[in-house]
Image: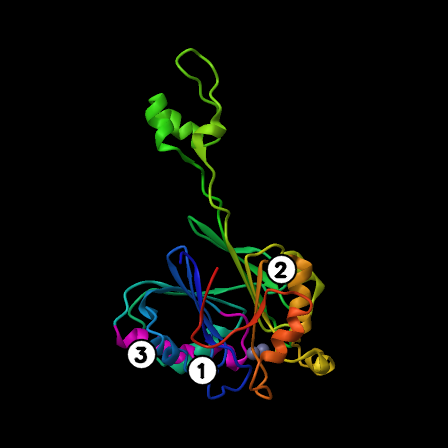
Amino acid sequence: MNNALTILGSSSAIPTKTRNTTAQFLLFQSDKILIDCGEACINRLVRYKLPFDQIKYIFISHLHTDHILGLPGLLGSFALRNREKPLTIFSPQGLQEIIEPLVGPTMVQPYELNWQVVDTTVSQVILDENDYTVSTIPLAHRVPTAGFLFREKVKPPNVKKEAIQKYNLSIDQIKALKEGKEIFDTSGQMMDSQTLLIPPQPAKSYAFCSDTMYLESIIHHVKGVDLLYYEATYLHELKDLAKARGHATAYEAALTAQKAQVKKLLMGHFSTRYTDMTAHELEAQQVFANSFAVEDGHTYEV
Ligand SMILES: [Zn+2]
Ligand SMILES: [Zn+2]
């Protein structure tokens, strides 16, 4: 799997026997990424044998405790293990001020730790890597909250090996073809580049939306993504309670997926009043067939 998402927690504010609070480990274009960090997140990372020392970026959606309480423990573990690799944490304003006193002045982080504040009111690119970008998705919750959109960059096409041999293509010609330029054969005839190229794989994308109530503007931001994670704290019979608490229902998650024409929907952040998520899946699948309730410890391909 090139890109893979492992669920570390899919319960809402309180953990259950089988579900921890929100956290996800994302392998994206060989980078190791943590999304949200509910309490005892380090415990889940160890249990699922994930390479947590290699986490390069942490993205925190908002400052509710069920999304950040695992950070002191995780940063403490990094310090104790003499981590050297730099770490960048993206979050809404205020996270550094909460976490640093908890980690304590005695536990100096022996590596470069960068705190990046994100604006939760606009969608903008906050990370531009060689082969992917990360953008914010403004969400509607009780406190400033951002979702995150991970999108691969489109790779240049490859030139067919047989074509290189058959036409004895030079390095400059191969480079020109990859850049979409025209090339000419020895007689000066323009060559048909389409027969020489292997088209690139489509760029993959993953959108993380938790916590949020139903919001039409999200649809535009997650249009056509390969994988959408959307919170479904409640079933739709509790839609008024969901709205009052800044949360969504399984029906609303599916409606977002259907309107945005995504390829697959994962639902999580379940209220502890539910022990079996079959009803969530049935409710969602009536609107958007490719809907699933996540389980802690499961890995999903992006
Ligand atoms: Zn939450
Ligand atoms: Zn919240």
Residue 41, compared with residue 25, is above or below; it is below
Q: Secondary structure at mark 2?
A: loop
Mark 2 residue CB less than 8 A from any atom of ligand 2: no
Amino acid type for the residue under numbered disc 3: Met
- The amino acid at mark 2 is Val
**Which range is magenta?**
60-81
- For the residues labelled 2 and 3, the Cα–Cα distance comes to 35 Å
Left or right: 270 as drawn, with respect to 33: right
Q: Position of residue 231 (x, y in %)?
A: 59, 73
* Residue 39: image tag: 1
Residue 175 visible (yes or no): yes
Distance from the alpha carbon under mark 3 to that under mark 1: 19 Å
Look at mark 3 in the image and give the residue it sits on.
107
The tag on residue 293 is none
Q: Is residue 63 magenta?
A: yes
Specify the farthest residue to the right: 240
Q: Is residue 72 magenta?
A: yes
| Disc 1 from disc 2: Cα separation | 28 Å
Q: Which residue is mark 2?
A: 122
Q: Nearer the viewer, mark 1 or mark 2?
A: 1
Residue found at the very far top of the displayed protein: 187
N-terminal label among 3 and 1: 1
Instruction: Identify the residue shown where x is 40% and y is 56%.
Output: 2
Residue 169 shows in this picture: no
Ligand 2's image quarter is bottom right
- 2 and 3 marks in contact (CB < 8 Å): no
Residue sitting at 64 percent across and 69 percent down?
A: 285
Q: Which secondary structure lies at badge 3?
A: loop
